[in-house]
Image (cartoon, rainbow, N blue to C red):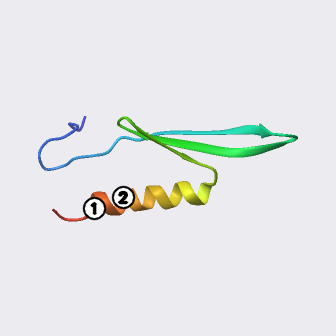
Amino acid sequence: MIPENDGEHSGRWYVLRVWFERDGDRLVWRASVRENALRTSFSSPKALLAYLSRSVDIAEEPS
């Protein structure tokens, strides 16, 4: 088991929800990501992946 934060390694936890909802007679794709208390919603997979990509880039920047 890897400790959550051992001083050398740290991580981020995301809760990802993906679902379809009705918009009239069609189904539309939806998603949300929760990181701590912040929830961000998305209406396309492209927007979700761009957000996650930016989050990883920020997390990997040296301090």
Residue 25 horizontal/vertical position (percent): 88, 41
Q: Is residue 41 left or right of residue 11?
A: right
Q: Is residue 30 left or right of residue 32?
A: right
Residue 39 horizontal/vertical position (percent): 45, 40
For residue 56, what is the image quadrant?
bottom left
Quarter holding the C terminus is: bottom left
> For numbered disc 1, what is the local secondary structure?
helix
Residue 45 horizontal/vertical position (percent): 61, 55
Badge 1, how many Cα within 10 Å: few under 14, some, many 20+?
few
Q: In this view, does 47 lie above or below 1?
A: below
Q: Is residue 57 left or right of residue 7?
A: right
Residue at 14% across / 41% down in the picture? 6
Residue 32 horizontal/vertical position (percent): 54, 42
Task: Specify the amino acid type for callout 1.
Answer: Glu
Q: Tell whether label 2 touches label 1 (CB within 8 Å).
A: yes
Residue at 63% across / 54% down in the picture? 44
Q: Mark 2 points at which residue?
A: 56
Q: Tell me the distance, in whole angstroms, between the alpha carbons under discs 1 and 2.
A: 6 Å
Quarter holding the N terminus is: top left
Of all residues shown, which one is farthest toward the right? 25
Residue at 43% across / 61% down in the picture? 53
Residue at 19% across / 49% down in the picture? 9
Mark linked to residue 26: none
Q: Mark 1 points at which residue?
A: 60
Relative to the observer, which residue lies in front, 58 or 3? 58
Q: Is residue 34 above or below residue 50?
A: above
